[in-house]
Image (spheres, helix red, strand yellow):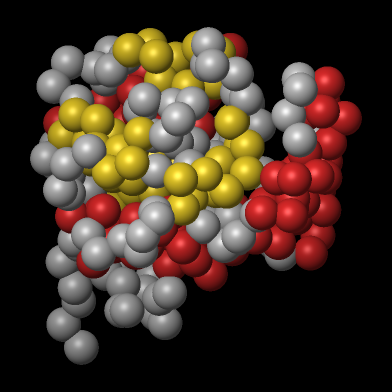
Amino acid sequence: MILPEMLTILVTGEPLARTLSERGDFVRLIRDASGSDSGDWRAVDARAETALPALDSVTALVITGSPASVTERADWMLRSEAYLRVAVRAGTPTFGICFGHQLLASALGGKVDKNPSGREIGTVEMEVLEPDPILRDLPSPPLANQTHVDSVLTLPEGARVIARTRLDPHAAVRFGERAWGVQFHPEIDGQVMRHYIDARLEVIESEGIDARGLARTATDGTAGTLTLRRFLETLPQPVR
């Protein structure tokens, strides 16, 4: 896949220290998962930047995950939400991952809070609810890697749920004509999924979840990864 120029990754956090050391940051993980062999990627740290890039310089936006919570309402989150509102309304292709998915929902008028069904972590089966370009030709069963406590509880007006899981009714959402959010992590493969399970082993088990079983059944979550690639395939391709 050849990516269009100036795809912008809006960085909202870093992965676990072990993952960062062994595999790299979210930008690296997303690039690796994209399957791309070229393209002009730009990483912008939403936490540090006071002026986010002008939308006329942005071909598409991918918003990373984060250990932060949208419910914190930090200044940088509010600034990013205002930016995303304009981006989505302007038709900028946008893809939010986990925290990025929640940030998009909040920006557009939805509600984010603790998932009343509890923590979702591990390789999880999705149920596709309606056809969509980012869900095209997924393997069966469609598996994706999850690690989150917060969820989108109330959708913004006009948003459509396109996939759900047993614990999250809003696992994948189309927020607009060219804007999507996924609660799962397309960039997390089986190895990184086990990093997260290992790091949270005690708290997971204290919640009555079989953490060691989750680690044994963790896979690359290929269907989740394909949603990122399908999003990139919707973008205009550069002339070479």
Residue 158: give x, y in percent of width and height.
Answer: 13, 22
Q: Is residue 66 above or below residue 139?
A: above
Picture quadrant of residue 120: top right
Total numbered circles: 0
17 or 133, which is in the foreground? 133
* Relative to 235, 73 lies left or right: right
Q: Residue at x 43, y 67 (%)?
A: 34
For residue 158, above or below residue 32: above
Residue displayed at 36% across by 60% down:
140
Q: Is residue 183 above or below residue 55?
A: above
For the C terminus, give its image quadrant.
bottom left
Q: Where's residue 27, x and y in %?
A: 55, 57
* On-image quarter of the N terminus: bottom left
Q: Which residue: 31% across, 61% down?
A: 138
Please state if 210 lies on the left or on the right of 82 as rendered.
right
Residue drawn at x 24%, y 17% as measured from the top left: 156
Residue 237 % position (x, y): 19, 73
Is residue 174 shown to the viewer in this render? Answer: yes
Where residue 171 sits: x, y (%)? 39, 34
Identity of the residue furthest to the right in this view:
202
